């Protein structure tokens, strides 16, 4: 009889072992194998970091040429001192991996279209991966890698960095794997130089992958080209460009020629293409930076400020550090996944970046001969494709997908009937994008980190190709400067706003704007430089430069800096944290002038009074900001909805400033009228109707206690995997908006704030909304967030080797060769 209990217990034990070792579906997701995940020896418990965690270590690695010391301060910022550059970059790679490995690798998986391989058999992941491969991300990274490895400087730096990352990966056990690997049940791969190139291409996708070509093409049946220029004007009336108005530009070095058939086949063609991208970069990806010359500062030295606006995530996109070797001593913030300091300063200069917002990606409609997709019609004959790439998309929990991508004279075919139901027969869309071209972006940062003066800065940046950036510079010599730098296609007027005909070469790019003609400013008379994602030049610039420009922050900063004198770093801190809503200051008079107050009941007038008495500050407690946002958004819908209803897919609503400036010029703006009614609506009708339509939601928010701006918009810093909500930080008491200097939206905003005073003894300040550690179980995971919310800064400590006994040094890592 004893055999029966034994058999039963054995079967139960075997069943439990099987169940605990298997990943099970739950609510559309998959649980990790619970046996491993809950194991006290190797599960998630091991990721809980002690409050007195000791980060000190004595490490030996084959390949190191000398000795390296890493001093971690009280904020876990590493100060790396190496005897040569190769050891410096090896150690940077090791430290990045030590604190941010999962983030580094996952970003490259995203860049290479391998999300399905990790996250599973979901159409949204598979389609994302297919689009990523089809737009040439991996192809572009492979082209970049050839350039990286052909240059002895970048090859040496990347080889060393990669070796450092792999040294850390090889040291890992199941117990100390980052918790995301345990949750998702996979292990890190070997790092490679290709992954560095992929990360930099992902940066290009984020910052230079935005365009409206497909959306504009879908508007064609409703809006002609003249209408489009009203909906998307190239130069706003109120523009304050980066290059001061009135600057005289040289004649163009290249004059593109419009194809003879453009009026009929391009501008006049009314066919829409009902295609929408699977994913699109956030149009608010941008930044502020400005530099003030010594004649406007209290210290008499230049001050440089920068706050890049990106998605706010845990772990943060940024990692703060100091790099020191015999050739460099630079402090600032770096990208986990790439060598060098990206935004920062050294003993002589400071540098920062904002996004250029320029369109460097175009689409071409091509016609394949047949379903083999081996030939397409070009210049009057069938032309063989350049080559095919067979993309193998591994799908976790599903079959590997084989996706054949044809490459044409323009670039890869991103959409065809195998990837879009809107395309039939031989019709397909190819993508031409600067980021597909061979390039070596990392070389710029190698030289920029070592720059001593303006000539060094210019030499470092002049060959940078993508993504287009406003590269701000200031030096202890007193110089301030900015260049908008990248490879920008020289376009004829209107080129690239729509999908272009791909059947002949006349629509191809005819060259690039000569580098010396890129917009730039050097030591301006007014004593300051501002870039905030606005159009860089006024209408006298001799090239057509479409882009996703954001005007208002540039206007605000230009007016504020014009009025300031005796500027201090503390003044700049207040300015970076400024909540003044200049757009609302221009729009509120229009709203109040044209509302019919007699049509508003007593309850509604309560919210109208909030607008009237609002101080125009979009701070966390503001109710006026919430009411204004709801009213203005309702007005935009009221004005544009009737026309946009005729657009079947991928609808593009004009920017807020476009509508405001149109109404300021003409209260009878033609789109005010609702084309679906027999009467002719006026601005009085639209403004009043917009308020009344916004009112129910405002009343609902008020009753729910969510009318205050911070509560209403719910600022949140999500984990990179947004589904892991316990790793997020919600309910941040912070105001701001996309067109306000402090440009915080729901989960997007100033991802790094930095101020550098280039006095003889440099003083610098910074903060970012995160922490140095990527481990949610560490106290260094999010310990900077409260300071960032409150507008506080940390004083940046540029350590000298003689400071090893300073009380700020809490831990030391010593690295040497075996």
Image (cartoon, rainbow, N blue to C red):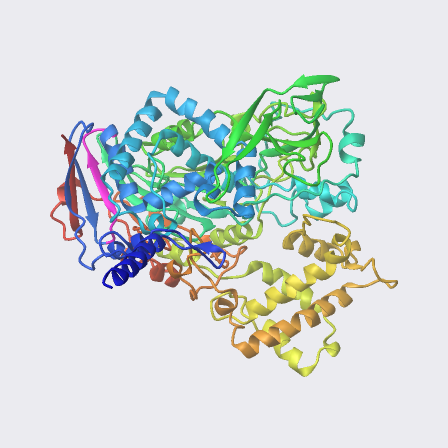
Question: Nearest the camera: 382 or 639?
Answer: 382
Q: Position of residue 679 (x, y in %)?
A: 87, 64
Quadrant of the frame with the N terminus? bottom left
Question: Nearest the camera: 96 or 75?
Answer: 96
Q: In the shown orientation, is residue 536 left or right of residue 803?
A: right
Q: Residue furthest front?
A: 1
Q: In the shown orientation, is residue 559 left or right of residue 47?
A: right
Does the magenta segment cover residue 244? no
Q: Position of residue 517 (x, y in %)?
A: 55, 28
Q: In the shown orientation, is residue 749 left or right of residue 764?
A: right
Q: Residue furthest left?
A: 805
Question: Nearest the camera: 577 or 474?
Answer: 577
Quadrant of the frame with the C terminus? top left
Q: Residue at x 71, y 68 (%)?
A: 593
Q: Residue furthest right?
A: 678
Q: Position of residue 629 (x, y in %)?
A: 60, 64
Residue 165 visible here: yes
Does the magenta segment cover residue 78? yes
Residue 171: quadrant of the picture: top left
Residue 12: quadrant of the picture: bottom left
Q: Which residues are magenta?
A: 75-85
Q: In the shown orientation, is residue 256 left or right of residue 151?
A: right
Question: Nearest the camera: 644 or 516?
Answer: 644
Residue 776 visible here: no
Residue 402: quadrant of the picture: top right
Q: Residue at x 62, y 28 (%)?
A: 490
């Amino acid at each position: 009889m004893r055999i029966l209990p034994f058999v039963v217990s054995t079967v139960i034990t075997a069943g439990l072992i099987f169940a605990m070792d298997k990943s099970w579906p739950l609510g559309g997701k998959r649980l990790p194998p619970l046996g491993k995940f809950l194991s006290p020896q190797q599960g998630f418990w091991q990721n809980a970091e002690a409050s007195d965690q000791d980060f000190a270590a004595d490490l030996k690695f084959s390949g190191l040429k000398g000795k390296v010391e890493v001093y971690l301060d009280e904020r876990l910022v590493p100060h790396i001192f190496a005897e040569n550059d190769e050891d410096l970059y090896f150690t940077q790679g090791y430290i990045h991996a030590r604190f941010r490995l999962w983030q580094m690798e996952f970003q490259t998986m995203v860049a290479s279209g391998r999300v399905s391989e990790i996250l599973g058999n979901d159409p949204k992941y598979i389609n994302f991966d297919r689009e990523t491969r089809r737009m040439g991300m991996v192809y572009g990274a492979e082209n970049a890698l050839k350039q990286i490895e052909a240059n002895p400087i970048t090859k040496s730096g990347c080889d060393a960095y990669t070796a450092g990352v792999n040294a850390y990966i090889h040291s890992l056990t199941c117990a100390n794997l980052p918790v995301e690997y345990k949750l998702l049940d996979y292990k890190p791969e070997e790092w490679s130089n290709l992954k560095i190139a992929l990360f930099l291409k992902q940066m290009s996708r984020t910052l230079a992958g935005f365009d409206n070509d497909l959306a504009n093409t879908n508007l064609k049946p409703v809006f002609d080209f003249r209408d489009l220029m009203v909906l998307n004007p190239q130069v706003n009336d109120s523009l304050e460009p980066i290059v001061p108005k009135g600057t005289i530009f040289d004649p163009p070095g290249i004059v593109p020629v419009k194809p003879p058939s453009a009026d009929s086949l391009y501008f006049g063609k009314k066919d829409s293409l009902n295609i929408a991208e699977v994913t699109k970069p956030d149009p608010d990806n941008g930044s502020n930076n400005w530099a003030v010359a010594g004649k406007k500062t209290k210290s008499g030295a230049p001050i440089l400020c920068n706050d890049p606006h990106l998605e706010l995530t845990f772990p943060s996109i940024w990692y703060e550090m100091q790099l020191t070797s015999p050739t460099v001593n630079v402090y600032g913030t770096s990208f986990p996944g790439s060598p060098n300091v990206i935004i920062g300063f050294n003993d002589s200069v400071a540098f920062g970046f904002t996004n250029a917002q320029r369109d460097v990606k175009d689409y071409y409609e091509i016609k394949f001969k047949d379903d083999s997709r081996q030939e397409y019609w070009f210049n009057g004959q069938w032309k063989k494709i350049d080559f095919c790439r067979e993309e193998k998309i591994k799908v976790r929990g599903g079959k590997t997908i084989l996706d054949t991508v044809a490459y044409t004279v323009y670039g890869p075919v991103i959409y065809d009937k195998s990837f879009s139901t809107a395309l039939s027969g031989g019709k397909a869309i190819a993508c031409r994008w600067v980021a597909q071209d061979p390039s070596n972006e990392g070389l710029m940062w190698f030289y920029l980190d070592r720059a001593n003066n303006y000539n060094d800065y210019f030499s470092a940046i002049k060959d940078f190709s993508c993504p287009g950036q406003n590269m701000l510079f200031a030096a202890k010599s007193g110089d301030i400067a900015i260049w908008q730098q990248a490879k920008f296609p020289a376009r004829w007027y209107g080129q690239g706003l729509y999908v272009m005909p791909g059947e002949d070469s006349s629509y191809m790019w005819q060259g690039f704007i000569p580098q010396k003609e890129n917009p730039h400013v050097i030591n301006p008379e007014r004593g300051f430089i501002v870039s905030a994602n606005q159009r860089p030049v006024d209408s006298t610039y001799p090239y057509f430069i479409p882009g996703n420009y954001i005007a208002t922050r540039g206007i605000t900063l230009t007016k504020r800096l014009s009025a300031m004198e005796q500027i201090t770093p503390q003044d700049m801190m207040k300015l970076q944290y400024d909540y003044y809503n200049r757009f609302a200051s221009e729009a509120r008079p229009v709203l109040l002038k044209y509302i019919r107050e007699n049509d508003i009941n007593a309850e509604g007038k309560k919210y109208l009074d909030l607008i009237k008495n609002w101080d125009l500050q979009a701070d966390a407690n503001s109710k006026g900001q919430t009411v204004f946002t709801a009213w203005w958004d309702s007005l935009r819908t009221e004005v544009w909805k009737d026309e946009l209803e005729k657009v079947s897919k991928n609808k593009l609503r004009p920017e807020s400033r476009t509508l405001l400036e149109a109404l300021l010029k003409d209260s009878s703006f033609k789109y005010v009228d609702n084309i679906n009614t027999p009467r002719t609506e006026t601005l009085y009708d639209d403004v009043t109707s917009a308020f009344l339509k916004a009112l129910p939601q405002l009343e609902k928010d008020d009753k729910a206690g969510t009318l205050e701006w911070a509560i209403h918009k719910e600022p949140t810093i999500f984990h990179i995997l947004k589904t892991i909500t316990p790793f997020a930080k919600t309910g941040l008491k912070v105001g701001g908006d996309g067109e306000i200097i402090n440009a915080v939206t729901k989960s997007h905003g100033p991802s790094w704030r930095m101020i550098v005073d280039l006095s003889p003894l440099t003083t610098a300040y910074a903060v970012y909304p995160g922490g140095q550690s990527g481990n949610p179980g560490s106290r260094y995971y999010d310990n900077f967030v409260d300071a960032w919310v409150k507008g506080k800064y940390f004083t940046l400590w540029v350590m000298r080797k003689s400071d090893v006994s300073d009380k700020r040094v809490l831990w030391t890592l010593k690295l040497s060769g075996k």
